Amino acid sequence: MLLSIQHETKLMYSEPVSETVFEVRMAPPSNEDQTNLGYRLRITPGAPVTSYRDGFGNRVDLFNMLTSYRELVVRATTVARTHRRIGDVRLAEVAWNPDHAGAEALEFVQPSPLVDHSPALDEFVASLPYPSGSLLSVVQTVIDAVRRRLKYEKKVTTARTPVGEALELGRGVCQDYSHLFLGACRALGIPARYVSGYVHAPGELATHAWCQVWADRSGWIDVDPTHGNFLDDNYVATAFGRDYSDVPPNRGVWKGLAEETIHVAVKTEALERMPHDWSEWGIGGPRAGDSWTQKAQHPRRFHGPKVQLGYRQQQGQQQQ
């Protein structure tokens, strides 16, 4: 499937801010399941961008803004072709073996910042039946248990909610479903990692999160705990890590005495052929009437003395 993805992040401030350091992880890699045919990043106000690879091999676009501003807009445009391998068939060919993790997967059996040990997670894992049979059978059991334990509900968790807190709430979004799936798999000795990306599903917010499990010689296999399925060609991955804290679409700091509001708009579209000028958004970006799904988070207010103000952390985009 040939997909175009347009992702706009708009940060607005009630007063001028400055000295921004901004990271973006929105560029899909090319691998066995997808090919990035083109990626463009547009920043307003303009700033030089430096690209590098983080410790997990993800592309990071970094820029600094020293001058003051009240609105920052980051637009990422991608055209990607998906050719995803069938995951459940490959998992069915692998026997569950908690003591056999490849060298590149060992890190993904350990706890991570948002998928750490907690009484709630220990209780959840203890409720699972003892694993046996194929890796497919074990993974499906974990998926089913996650979907029974959590109810999908927006605005009850945030981008920084750890898995133990989401479990106690019993509610959350795809980010929380993925963290719970990761915690259970790792407790069972199955290496599992977090995936940030997009899903082409008209009418839903296209930013999404899912997981990959390590299947020995079959490599990493994608699983979507939120929807309870293995992936098809509607999914495009952008970054991989231990949990959300490794792969946020945006991350940064800024200085100023202001309220910050973040708006996110994403549009995915299936294409028949590569467009002539796919990098152009048109004047004004998203327009009324376009099939965009949007998310707005409430302003974050600063309370405290207006002296010796240090850097403040930018709001992140919770993946839903």
Image (cartoon, rainbow, N blue to C red):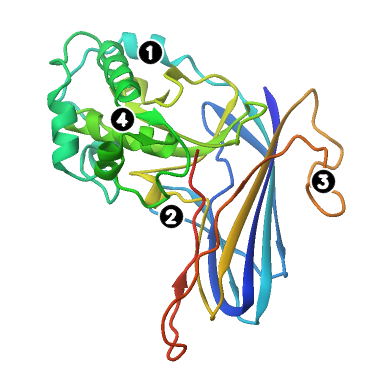
1 or 4: mark nearer the eye: 4
10 Å neighbourhood of mark 2: few (<14), some, or many (≥20)?
few
Whichever of callouts 3 and 2 sits on the residue coming sooner in the sequence is 2
Kindly check if marks 3 and 1 are in contact, taking CB atoms under 8 A apart as contact.
no
Residue that protrudes farthest toward the bottom in the picture: 307
- Residue nearest the observer in this picture, 173 or 197: 173
- Asked if residue 93 lies left or right of residue 127, the reply is right
Residue with the mark numbered 1:
90
Whichever of callouts 3 and 1 sits on the residue coming sooner in the sequence is 1
Q: CA distance from mark 1 to mark 4?
A: 19 Å
Mark 4 falls on what kind of element? Answer: helix
Q: Position of residue 78 (x, y in %)?
A: 68, 42
- Asked if residue 307 lies left or right of residue 18, the reply is left
Q: Is residue 15 above or below residue 98?
A: below
Whichever of callouts 3 and 4 sits on the residue coming sooner in the sequence is 4
Whichever of callouts 2 and 1 sits on the residue coming sooner in the sequence is 2
Residue with the mark numbered 2:
54
State the residue at coordinates (67%, 73%).
70
Label 2 amino acid? Asp
Kindly check if marks 3 and 4 are in contact, taking CB atoms under 8 A apart as contact.
no
Residue with the mark numbered 4:
181
Residue with the mark numbered 3:
287
Mark 1 falls on what kind of element? Answer: helix
Q: Is residue 72 above or below residue 146?
A: below
Q: CA distance from mark 3 to mark 2?
A: 34 Å
Label 3 amino acid? Arg
